[in-house]
Amino acid sequence: MDLYVWSLLLGVVGLGAMSFTGLIGSGHSSGHGHGHGHAHGGHGHASPGNGHAHSHAHGDGHSHGIASKSLWTITSPRYLFSLALGFGTAGELLRPVLSGPLLLIAAAAGAIVFERLVVSPLWNFTMRFASTPASTLESAVTDEATAVTAFDQNGQGIVSLEVDGQVVQILATLRSDDRVLPTRVRAGQRVRIEDVNVEKNSCTVSLI
């Protein structure tokens, strides 16, 4: 078995297995997630005095996130199997007219074109049928919430936010850095959740 046939078979088997397990796994996650549909949380911006530091940290985190996402894309199994399939297909189709290094180069170029124009659109279309997992308390970190009650002297109160299409209420505690400020959280005020405790259905919030 030569390189092109082997590559073609590897791509077909790999993508086929990933498509099957991806659809089955997503469906299972969705069914399981609804059992935790009331869990939620959020995460907050820094207090007004730390606005510049927050912006700088956010910018660095955004750049790092883009680089990490790009690296993950080109090393993901789906991407590699797609290239293998495209390489093998192009190699077999061009074998009658090319050979040697020229065939290798043409097959490599064909792999990239095949992945971008054929496999990616089909893969994205197929994954649309996979159910979206329900949101959880942990996944809502960084979300905003609304104070249902005014916070007491200990910096505690009830907040509400939307999780998986449902409005839920949990106990919130103002973070220590914000409790020393003269400002009190009033009913109806927006806050941002910094941390969550799933077992106690509570969270830590910060001022926006």
Image: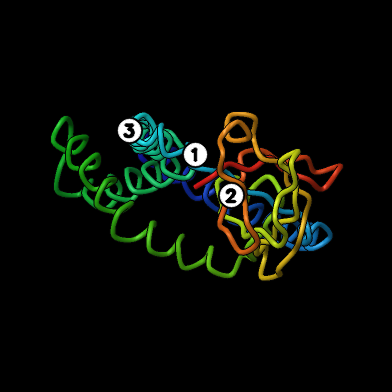
Q: Is residue 122 above or below residue 139?
A: below
In primary-sequence order, the first of circles 3 and 2 is 2
Residue 73 image-quadrant placement:
top left
In primary-sequence order, the first of circles 1 and 2 is 2
How crowded pointer 3 is (Cα within 10 Å; few <14, some 14-19, many 20+) is rated as: few
Disc marking residue 52: 3
Mark 1 element type:
helix
Residue at 71% x, 50% y is: 151
| C-alpha separation, residue under disc 1 versus residue under disc 2 | 9 Å
**Residue 2 visible at all:** no
Q: Position of residue 159 (x, y in %)?
A: 70, 57
| C-alpha separation, residue under disc 1 versus residue under disc 3 | 39 Å
Q: Is residue 96 left or right of residue 140?
A: left
Disc marking residue 77: 1
Residue tagged 2: 18
Residue at 44% x, 38% y is: 6
Q: Are marks 3 and 2 in contact (CB under 8 Å)?
A: no
Q: Is residue 199 left or right of residue 205?
A: right
Residue 88 image-quadrant placement:
top left
Amino acid beneath label 2: Met
Q: Are marks 1 and 2 in contact (CB under 8 Å)?
A: yes
Residue at 82% x, 48% y is: 201
| C-alpha separation, residue under disc 3 versus residue under disc 2 | 44 Å
Quarter of the figure with the N terminus: top left
Q: Is residue 75 left or right of residue 93?
A: right
Mark 2 element type:
helix
Mark 3 element type:
helix
Amino acid beneath label 3: His
Between 115 and 206, the one lying in front of the other is 206
Q: Position of residue 105 (x, y in %)?
A: 18, 36
Amino acid beneath label 1: Pro
